[in-house]
Amino acid sequence: MSTAVETISEVKTDLLHASISLKKEENERNQKEDSARMLKARRAIESYLEEKRLSKAISDGWDE
């Protein structure tokens, strides 16, 4: 009977460790996705601002 209890305890421990590992992997993946999304947004904003500056510089040149 003691062996069955030990086996059940080991299985519970293994399941707990697996669950923790899966949660950790999910959190890491979410962080990477969030970082990539933020970088993409930042680049889009920088591109928009640069295009706006260039457009203004060109239009200022033609007006003079």
Image (tube, rainbow, N blue to C red):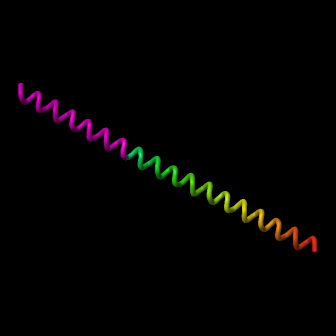
Q: Where's residue 60, x and y in %? A: 87, 70
Res. 43 image quadrant:
bottom right
Position of the N terminus, as image quadrant, is top left
* Residue 7 placement, left or right of 16: left
Question: From what the image shows, is residue 11 above or below residue 41?
Answer: above
Residue visible at 57% across and 57% down in the picture:
39
* Residue 63 placement, left or right of 23: right
* Residue 41 placement, left or right of 22: right
Residue visible at 93% across and 71% down in the picture:
63
Q: Does the magenta stretch mainly form a helix, a strand or a loop?
A: helix
Q: In the depicted view, which residue is nearer to us: 52 or 7?
A: 52
Q: Where's residue 46, x and y in %? A: 67, 62
Segment colored magenta: 1-24
Give yes or no for residue 9 being in the magenta stretch: yes
Q: Where's residue 34, x and y in %? A: 52, 50
Res. 56 image quadrant:
bottom right
Give yes or no for residue 50 being in the magenta stretch: no
Question: From what the image shows, is residue 20 above or below residue 60?
Answer: above
Residue visible at 7% across and 30% down in the picture:
3
Residue visible at 16% across and 32% down in the picture:
9
* Residue 63 placement, left or right of 38: right
Position of the C terminus, as image quadrant, is bottom right
Residue extending furthest toward the top: 1
Q: Where's residue 51, x and y in %? A: 75, 63
Q: Total label count?
A: 0
